[in-house]
Image (spheres, rainbow, N blue to C red):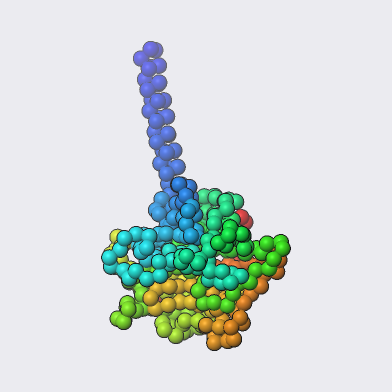
Amino acid sequence: MKYQSSLIRVLLLGWSAALSFAACRTGDANSTARVQISQQDGTLRVEIGGRLFTVYHFKDVPRPYFYPVLGPDEAPMTRKWPLEESTDEEHDHPHHRGLWYAHSSVNGLDFWTETKNACKIVHDGFLKVQSGKDYGIVKSKDKWIDHDGVVVCTDVRTMRIYNLPGDERMFDFDITLQAPPDKPVVLGDDKDGTIATRVAETMRLKHKTEPGEGHIVMSTGLKDEDTWGKRADWCYYYGPVAGGSNGRETLGVAIFDHPDNPRHPTTWHVRDYGLFAANPFGLHDFEKKPKGTGDMTIPAGQSVTFRYRFYYHRGDEKEARVAEQYQKYAAEKLPPD
């Protein structure tokens, strides 16, 4: 009886250990199927299925930004410089940091560059940071501050990062700009803005005077050099990218302009050297209209909201089914925050 009791105890311990191991394995499997967001010393690290997607930098920076942004096969979709040392990239436009939102004329003040005359967008706290099975959410608030420390306007931005099948990547960037209660805010007619990314160097259409291997295409069918300043529902920038386990392959990023946005379809500040931005304000530059035509005034105490989606995929716009994905985006309802 003593022997049988000991044997039963051993078997129970064995079964318990096996169940615990299985539970850990199941927990690991569930965690790798989720969008995981973790805060680390002034940044948010975003992983999808246990693999890094991006890092959101919000502390002691000229403006919050995402860097790096990794696409299919964990290939880098943003230029490295100036955030990393790089000898094989052109060192132009040091304010082009990964992926960001800013504008060069807000009540006449520059929030776009990093010159001595530029102002700053300062992180003012998180309203929500939530991991999830289907998507994760980051909701934050920011202050746009002038040289004297005066708040020009504020914003609330909601970023949803989705867990998609395969290794394509998708996230939404929604921003509500709020004027202070006692003063309107003028989003000025200037080309340098607003939601933007600097694509990987190898995706460029042009390297100084030499042609590159990248391409740009719009929902309207316009391509490459003809796309700058034009209006379209979406725009797709693609080209060869190195760095994933598959080596060098053609990858692309689309930006979708939501049909509810003011001035939809937006005008695009998309350049052959790798800048890729949607900017609905720069009508003087883009469409040769009188200066100030593109101004948008937010009355005192009121707000305006813009919604965008980023979609990272392999291949050109047809392989990536960009038009189809845009139609889904345009028709879907917002998930709950």
For the point 39% across and 36% down, the residue is 21
| Image quarter of the C terminus | bottom right
* Position above or below: 202 against 145: below
- From the viewer's perspective, tell me whether residue 116 is left or right of residue 244: right
Q: Position of residue 292 (x, y in %)?
A: 61, 81
* Residue 148 lies in quadrant: bottom right
Residue 319: x, y in percent? 41, 74
Relative depth, front residue between 292 and 75: 292
**Relative image position of residue 80 (x, y in whole percent):** 35, 63
Residue 321 appearing in the image: no
- The residue at the point 53 percent across, 66 percent down is 111
Which residue is the extreme one toward the top? 2
Question: x and y percent of residue 222 in the render?
Answer: 46, 84
Where on the picture, by quarter, is residue 87?
Answer: bottom left
Q: How many marks?
A: 0
The residue located at (30%, 63%) in the rendering is 86
Q: Nearer the viewer, residue 159 or 300?
A: 300
Question: Compared with residue 226, is residue 75 higher up or lower down, i.e. above or below?
Answer: above
Quarter the N terminus occupies:
top left
- Whether residue 92 is visible to the viewer of this picture, yes or no, is yes
Q: Residue at x 71, y 61 (%)?
A: 181
